[in-house]
Amino acid sequence: MNIHRATHLGMCFGVRDAIELALDRAAREPVTILGDLVHNPTVLGRLRRNGIQIEADPGRVNTASVMITAHGASERRIGALQARGFRVTEATCPLVRVAHRALKSLVAAGFHPVVVGLRGHVEVRGMTEDLEGFEVVLNEAEVDALAERPRFGVIAQTTQPIARVRELVAQLRRRFPRSEIRFVDTVCQPTKQRQHAAEELAQRCQAIVVVGGAHSNNTRQLAETCRRHGARVYRVETAADLDTAWFTGVSDVGLTAGTSTPDETIATVEARLREIGAGLASGERRAGGPGEGSRPGSAVSAALALSHS
């Protein structure tokens, strides 16, 4: 079984910087992160082991110092925290800050704001909480449901696939041909690189393993991209989640990971995949070749792919 790593995968610079900032702050004073710094349980476990508290509700915080997650927050929320006496440190990704500035500029120029993203996601909330009126869309039906405006200004959640974003901008133009529509591309470069690499991987591998947190939006998007290109997709958080049966009869397996997945997690998943491949090859040699039930298109394999994708 051949293992193919995506050319771009795993942790981005924004996440690395946020983790380093949190650990540095915790070394100097007790600190509470307001929500998940990133959506990855391995990273969160490391932070907790270093004495960092994680609490979504500011009312339950018992430290004087708090930290905003890499996903960012609105000025309104930061101001409210400061008014309560907290010392606020922002671990906001620089590229999320770029998206915030782009949206503010569009609003200042008289455009009605539209965010292509996941409604309720912490990053999208941070982008929109300071606005009086805005729209959040993620599919064509939501675009079609919008009311006509003279001018629309569009940005995107930084982890959305750029192809989907462009499709929805095109749909908005078709829906409102008389409106002026200005689009600012705020999808971050690490997301674009990982999406493109995942597409290439899915076109040459029968199965793809996507490593990342269960609640990670960019990990979910990677899995959906691979699935659209016909590969069987398995999402895992750690090597312990891998199941040997998924790979019976599979010759080429792709490996990619979300932008909050640590290098060591990817390495252990890859090592486990190689162990699984060696074990399957040894079993086939003893049996004289793969059995009837281990063909890539077998019912068992298909059922496993559906249940874990």
Image: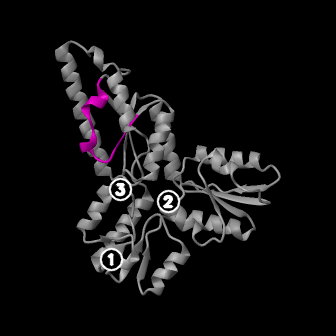
Q: Badge 3 local density, few (<14 within 10 Å), some, or many (20+)? A: many
**Left or right of 73 on screen, residue 207:** left
Which residue in the rendered view is the most extreme toward the left? Answer: 286
Residue 156 drawn above or below residue 69:
above
Mark 1: which secondary structure?
strand
Which residue is denoted by mark 2 in the rendering?
121
Using the numbered discs, state the Cα–Cα distance from disc 1 to disc 3 in whole angstroms. Answer: 19 Å
What's drawn in magenta, residue-wise? 233-248
Residue type indicated by callout 2: His
Residue 45 drawn above or below residue 55:
above
Q: Nearer the viewer, mark 2 or mark 3?
A: 2
Q: Nearer the viewer, mark 2 or mark 1?
A: 2
- Classify the position of the N terminus by image quarter: top left
Which residue is denoted by mark 3 in the rendering?
40
Using the numbered discs, state the Cα–Cα distance from disc 2 to disc 1 in whole angstroms. Answer: 23 Å
Give residue 17's position: percent from left, percent from top: 40, 64
Residue in the picture at 41% in, 60% down: 15
Residue in the picture at 65% in, 69% down: 104
Numbered mark located on residue 134 in the image: none
- Classify the position of the C terminus by image quarter: top left
Residue 234 is a magenta residue: yes
**Residue 250 appears in view:** no
Residue type indicated by callout 1: Val
Numbered mark located on residue 31 in the image: 1
